């Protein structure tokens, strides 16, 4: 089946630094990938839709300059949290469409802790 | 716009007992419905989905869900749970003919006690 690999699984960084999270589709091409943020005991909040070769589409309230998304190839999308602050600490999950418009495969998530 | 309501934030149950996790949705158009399971510090795994046809859908590990259009519900059930079923369960809805991007409910934490 379709596999989405997300790295790193955990990262701790100092306040003010930037962190890059990678999301790769291993056995299929993903023209569209999605980035979610999940707070403890809460649902997934869609942050942005990443389209290969074009600018990402951000959801209302998500800071584009803080959460930089790059989708340079059909198998890789990256999320960079710039100038991270403790309030950015969260669980970030990516997903990719793998089977038509309704087939979604999720990565294993990244636990970001900003100290 | 679609929305999903999971009525129970937490459902404790004893091993081998039956369980039902409730999900109601709201949409002005036809929908696809999904249940996902999330284990601690992991991503989401698709448990089952309703696209069309039979309103009762089943997963390979004994879960089933029934699409009820009149009650706009898609409750998840299992007749006998195991300790290993302890996880977070998310109901999601996707509108047909639109972007198909799913909207997730807040999740229900299923806690199975020995």
Image (tube, coloured by chain):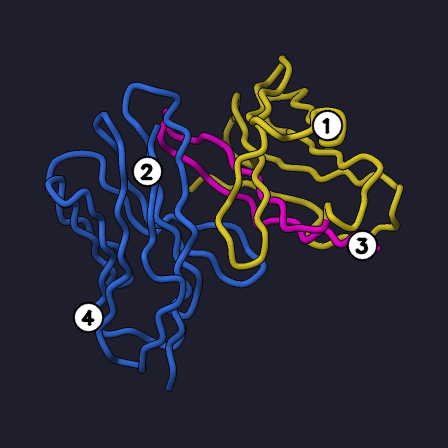
Mark 2, residue position: B93
Q: CA distance from mark 1 to mark 3?
A: 18 Å
Q: Residue A76: x percent and y percent?
A: 64, 29
Is A111 one of the magenta-colored residues?
yes
| Most distant residue in the bottom direction | B114
Q: Residue A78: x percent and y percent?
A: 69, 32
Q: Is residue B17 left or right of residue B101?
A: left
Q: Which chain is yellow?
A: A
Disc 3 chain ID: A
- What are the residue bounds of the magenta stretch? A89-115
Q: CA distance from mark 3 to mark 4?
A: 42 Å
Tell me the quarter of the image containing the C terminus of chain A. Answer: bottom right
Task: Tell me the SS state at disc 1.
Answer: strand
Q: Earlier in the sequence, mark 1 or mark 3?
A: 3
Mark 3, residue position: A12
Task: Tell me the SS state at disc 4.
Answer: loop
Disc 2 chain ID: B
2 vs 3, front mark: 2
Q: Which chain is blue?
A: B
Q: Residue B69: x percent and y percent?
A: 13, 40
Q: Residue B88: x percent and y percent?
A: 44, 60
Disc 4 chain ID: B
Mark 4, residue position: B79
Q: Residue at x 61, y 35 (%)?
A: A24
Task: Tell me the SS state at disc 2.
Answer: strand
């Amino acid at each position: 089946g379709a596999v989405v690999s997300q790295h790193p699984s955990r990262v701790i960084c100092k306040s003010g630094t930037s962190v890059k999270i990678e999301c790769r589709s291993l056995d299929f091409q993903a023209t569209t990938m999605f980035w979610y943020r999940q707070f403890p005991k809460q649902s997934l909040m869609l942050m942005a839709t990443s389209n290969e070769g074009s600018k990402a589409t951000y959801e209302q309230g998500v800071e584009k300059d803080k959460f930089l998304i790059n989708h340079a190839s059909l198998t890789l999308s990256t999320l960079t949290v710039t100038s991270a602050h403790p309030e950015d600490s969260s669980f970030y999950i990516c997903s990719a469409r793998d089977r038509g418009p309704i087939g979604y495969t999720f990565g294993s998530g990244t636990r970001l802790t900003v100290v | 716009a679609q929305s999903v309501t999971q009525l129970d934030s937490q459902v404790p149950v004893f091993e081998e007992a039956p369980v039902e996790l409730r999900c109601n949705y709201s949409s002005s158009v036809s929908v696809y419905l999904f249940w996902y399971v999330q284990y601690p510090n992991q991503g989401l795994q698709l448990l089952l989905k309703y696209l069309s046809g039979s309103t009762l859908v089943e997963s390979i590990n004994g879960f089933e869900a029934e699409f009820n259009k009149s009650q706009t519900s898609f409750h998840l059930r299992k007749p006998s749970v195991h300790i290993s079923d302890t996880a977070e369960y998310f109901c999601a809805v996707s509108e047909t003919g639109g972007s198909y991007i799913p909207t997730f409910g807040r999740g229900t934490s299923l806690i199975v006690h020995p």
